[in-house]
Amino acid sequence: MRGTDMAPVPEALLNRVAEAASVSPEETGWWDTQDSVTVLVESATVACQEGDLPRAALLLELAEEVVAASDGVPGRTALRLLTRRQLGTVRRLQGRYEESEHLLSSALAVAEDAPVRYGSELFELCNELGILFRYAGRFDHAAAFYNRARTLLRQAGAPEGAAMASVLHNIGGLAHARGDFAAAEEPARRAVHMRVQLLGENSVEVAADKAALAAVLTDLDRLDEAEDLLTEALAVIEEHHGPHHLETGMALGNLAALHYKQGRHDRAETGFDRCLFIKERHLGPSHPELAVTLNNLALSMRSREDLEGARHMWERALAILKGSVRDEHPLLRVVREALGGLPPSGRRSGPDLSGARPAEGAIIWHEIPRAYGLRPRLTPESLDVLRNRVHRAVDELAVRDDGDPRADEVALVIAGLPLPYLDGAGRGVPGGPDGDAEIRS
């Protein structure tokens, strides 16, 4: 244990932390605010990996309570930024987009007041807001935040690392969602190349990048290359996550979209069915991300003249989207137009939609969540390693910075919670100044 200026956590709150994180009260007896938040955030990470988003949200809400009870503690602002960003990410994953926007925007406002000190959080918040707005169908907002995240990385001297690969992955995905397939290819390819250099061909992160590139190539009618990439990606994702994981389901949806483009509609519908089953299992029956797959199933059913089946899928997609996104969401417009083009219920004649362009919703492209990384299940031993790493980093930075009170805040990111900017060799580099544009959500 180290000497620290961190205030002790109230005993009743500390007992709740111990219970929530499944550790013994004896082990938490000497924990301070930073210890408690660290363990809660790491436990939330594990919950997200296991698909238990409600538990992750509860853990992060408790972390926010711990931070709120630590008034006057050095590093409190950094801890609050961390917990609020992570909770905003979980709310986005839950499909609660307005709550996510509120949490992330409030954190961004704090980080912008000290852009050099909180440079790492600024990048993470801009990237996460870009992801949020891409899912919410607010593409101009998403583009502004992705571009700002890329600018921050360049200013920080980290143009080739894993963080930049993730931003390029997202920029390519946004261009794809907008229907600008030619513009999507270059950043998607760069993301694959960059991450292969960092992690090797068989990394699950590389597989996610390949799946995103394959979705772009599908719409560019480069179907052979797309199929090769998707086959490689699916094999890695399924080996890593298992056959029933959400990421596996999304990869299957990508493959089904390729089959649809190839005219293999029976195989496509089978793939969309399996994708929907897996997504419902993980996300529930009313998550807005289901609407993409429902739209794809409807198109597949329409191609074989099952108008009532298509109607049911589009009506369900419409009900989900109306409660989750704004009226201008492109997929919501696609679904409404598709329903308007069907003949009245019970009739089989009407406009032929089988040759209609699938539009935004028919080709699946998913931004694979990266905010939590891929980390092993927590054990008492791994928690000790994590705590020691936090404390050692704080001590080293305090010596280096001659007692600078920001040392505790900087050490938080070194602990692996959010990571600091990294260059291609994995060395930490300081956070850059604010981007040029003033971006508000």
Image: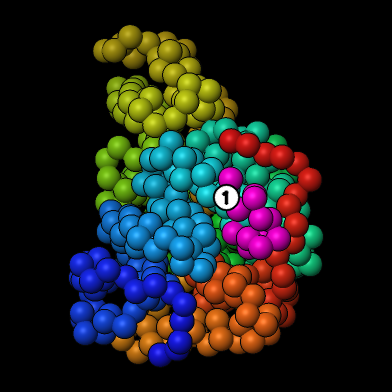
When the figure is inspected, residue 202 is found, relative to residue 180, above or below; the finding is below
> The C terminus appears in which quarter of the rendering?
top right
**Quadrant housing residue 144:** top right
The residue lying toward the viewer, choosing from 175 and 433, is 433
The residue lying toward the viewer, choosing from 436 and 175, is 436
The reply, left or right, for residue 346 in relation to residue 410 is left
When the figure is inspected, residue 12 is found, relative to residue 266, above or below; the finding is below
What's the magenta region? 109-121
x, y percent for residue 175: 67, 41
Residue found 30% across the figure and 37% down from its top: 286
When the figure is inspected, residue 261 is found, relative to residue 159, above or below; the finding is above
The residue lying toward the viewer, choosing from 308 and 76, is 76
Give the class, few, some or many, for how many residues have Cα within 10 Å of label 1's Cα (few <14, many ≥20): some
> The N terminus appears in which quarter of the rendering?
bottom left
The reply, left or right, for residue 48 in relation to residue 157 is left
Residue behind mark 1: 110
x, y percent for residue 421: 67, 69
